Amino acid sequence: MLLPQLTVYRHARRNRALITLSGDIDLDSAPLLRASLERCLRDGSHTIDVDLTSVRFCDCSGLNAFLRAAQQTTAAGGALRLHHPPPMLARMLEVTGCGFLLGPAFGPLPSPPGDAPAAPAPAPPHGPVPPAPVLLDDVR
């Protein structure tokens, strides 16, 4: 079994959490994402900001994890907001009508809970993503 190519960093204080993701969100790594977001709720964080600046790829299993977490946070009286999504995720959100997850996504990312206000966030590094060839050996 391959290890998920996703790194999750969580900074939480009281009822707020900042989740910073790095890597790829796909069928293999989506369970890690789901578990991380569910843990925020179990630990009492009802406002969850997700920084996607360092995410290279996100497929529909990642979108599904975000939608499930948004439903759970809303039911708990909170909110889930995605910040700086990669182009393919932004497009999926637009096509599916789930742009509400972006909230003020294009404004500065909030400071980690309890920290001094951060400087304005730099523009996300995402540019156009060229199509990549798929080799037979890449398919499982």
Image: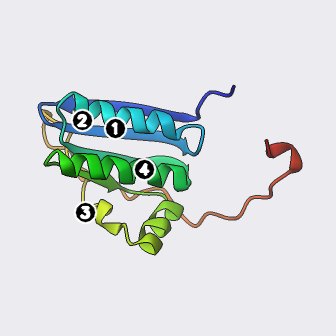
- Is residue 131 left or right of 15 when viewed as pictured? right
For the residues marked 3 and 2, what is the alpha-carbon distance in whole angstroms? 19 Å
Q: Amino acid at mark 3?
A: Gly
Q: Secondary structure at mark 1?
A: helix
Q: Which residue is mark 4?
A: 53
Query: In the image, residue 28 lies at what x, y percent?
Result: 60, 38
Q: CA distance from mark 1 to mark 2?
A: 7 Å
Q: Residue at x 38, y 72 (%)?
A: 97
Crowding at mark 4 (Cα within 10 Å: few <14, some 14-19, many 20+): many
Name the element at disc 4.
strand
Q: Residue furthest right?
A: 136
Give the residue number, with chain letter if any, for mark 2. Answer: 41
Q: Mark 3 — residue? A: 103
Q: Which residue is mark 1?
A: 37
* Gap in angstroms between the C-alphas marked 3 and 4: 16 Å
Q: In which quarter of the view is residue 85 placed?
A: bottom left
- The picture places residue 46, in percent across and down from the top left corner, at 18, 41
Q: Is residue 121 at all visible to an observer of this figure?
A: no
